[in-house]
Amino acid sequence: MHRILSKFRKSVKPSESTKLDPPPDHPGLSETMAMSRGSILGREDSQPEPVCGNAQNDAPLANLPPELRLHILSILELDRLSALVHASPAFHRDYRRSRRSILSKCLQLTLRSVTVDAYAVCQSSSDEFAATRTRDKVTQFIHSYQDRRAPAHNSHFTEYLTEDEAISMATFHSSIIKPLARRYVDWALTNLSEETKGSLDNELLSEAEETRLLRALYRFQLCCNLFGVGRLRASGELRLSSQGFQPVDILKLFICLFEPWEVEEIACIYAFAREKCDRIFEDIRWDVHEQNPKFEGQRPPTPDGAFDFDNSYTRDSLLKGTISRGLDLLHTVFSRVSDHAQLVLIMQAQITCLPVSFLEDEAWGETAQWQLRQERLSRREQKQQRRDPLPFTGDGDSETEGPRPPLAWTVMWGSTYSNLFGYYVQGVTRRWGYVMWDAARLERTGAKEVLARQYEEDWGDSDPRDELL
């Protein structure tokens, strides 16, 4: 039995390389094929069975006992599940008969401790949630999310997923999260190589690095769904102002659920999204400028599809709103745009102001953190005041093994507890994803020296925690 399973794991190849190759916009590389609802993930039972390249190769698979085939399907991660089901008609039939159960188990294997975050994104991405989103509903949702993150619930709740939920989670992970994760890694490590003046580090992600990146992507999307534009339609965006979350509310209700280095993981994804959207704003500035001749005869007022990027306040507001649409838009502008004209049309439909507080300079800002400290000294704030020891104890999953900060965090704060994030960390440091990487990568690339240099440039010999006493 073990010999059979081992053979399957080695022979079933994922549909895309697991090497940290640069993303598809680099010359000579092909686009990653994402799974769609119309393939193994969907409900279309009338779809044709896959045809094996060599029919004889499927015979040993088809002759295995059904319970063994089902077990094999249930111990694969999503990309290997996709490869096997596409390669074997026998496994394809088994998959279709037990889709909900198989997908649920594969999601748990693929996402591990991030499964709860992925499920929260699935729930909050629904049209129903977006259409009825209120302050009370968001608050209740976050309380439920907090309960599910408890270890007693974390490892078993996928057993209760509906088939539609499992399909939605698998599709979003394969078609949005995985491509963006590859792009993020290339972006961050390229920025790191520019800081170190060294070569690009193409080593595979460790399990801990992958966990940090995945949870950061999902939690960023969750922020967009709960406090940003997310999937709201135009009428829903008008209701946002009545939601009433102040920066300190977002901080207290949601951001404080996470350890400070986990907040910085989300901030690294925000920096990635901001840089991409800001560059797009620069690229399309004249196309959407109200003085462009194509808008002749439509002024005043400001024509539809025109935006004032020359006003810094307006630009920042539009940038914040557009970023808060989330990962779907980010994936679209990276992977689905064929030319400049199409980019302009997409952005004209997606650019929006956000009339409420969000993350950068607000929930992560100095003022919100100060206000929360005035209300109460949390357990984390008390640990910071005492400078409780927080040494690096190895790279692991803090969701399952207790607080285990990455090496970069302990280096930055001298192996003592810090509850500072957002305003207190330089944007240039987030550009290379400092809290994402394992100790081995920091040592190998010289990133520890970069971190020390950037901290000194920002704070000199001082410690910002001293200013809070």
Image (spheres, rainbow, N blue to C red):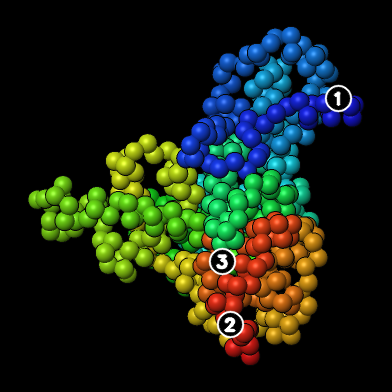
> Would you call the spot at circle 1 few (<14 residues within 10 Å), some (14-19), or many (20 or more)?
few
Residue 134 percent coordinates (x, y): 47, 61
Of 13 and 228, which appears nearest the observer?
13
Q: Is residue 369 above or below residue 35?
A: below
Q: 134 or 445: nearer the eye?
A: 445
Q: Position of residue 358 (x, y in %)?
A: 46, 66
Residue ID at (57%, 81%): 459
Q: Which residue is mark 1?
A: 4
Q: Nearer the viewer, residue 453 or 82?
A: 453
Let me know if residue 147 appears in the view: no
Q: Earlier in the sequence, mark 3 or mark 1?
A: 1
Q: Amino acid at mark 1?
A: Ile
In the rendered image, which quarter contains the N terminus? Answer: top right
Which type of secondary structure does the marked residue at label 1 adopt? helix
Q: Residue at (9%, 50%) from the top-left corner? A: 297
Secondary structure found at label 2 = loop
Q: Which residue is mark 2?
A: 460
* Quarter of the view holding residue 105: top right
Name above or below for residue 465 compared with residue 358: below
Front in this rendered view, residue 57 or 438: 438
Is label 2 or label 3 in front?
Answer: 2
- Dot label at residue 186: none
* Residue under the point 48% across and 68% down: 360
115 sits left or right of 234 in the view: right
Q: For residue 258, what is the image quadrant?
A: bottom right
Identified by mark 3, the residue type is Thr
Q: Which residue is mark 3?
A: 429
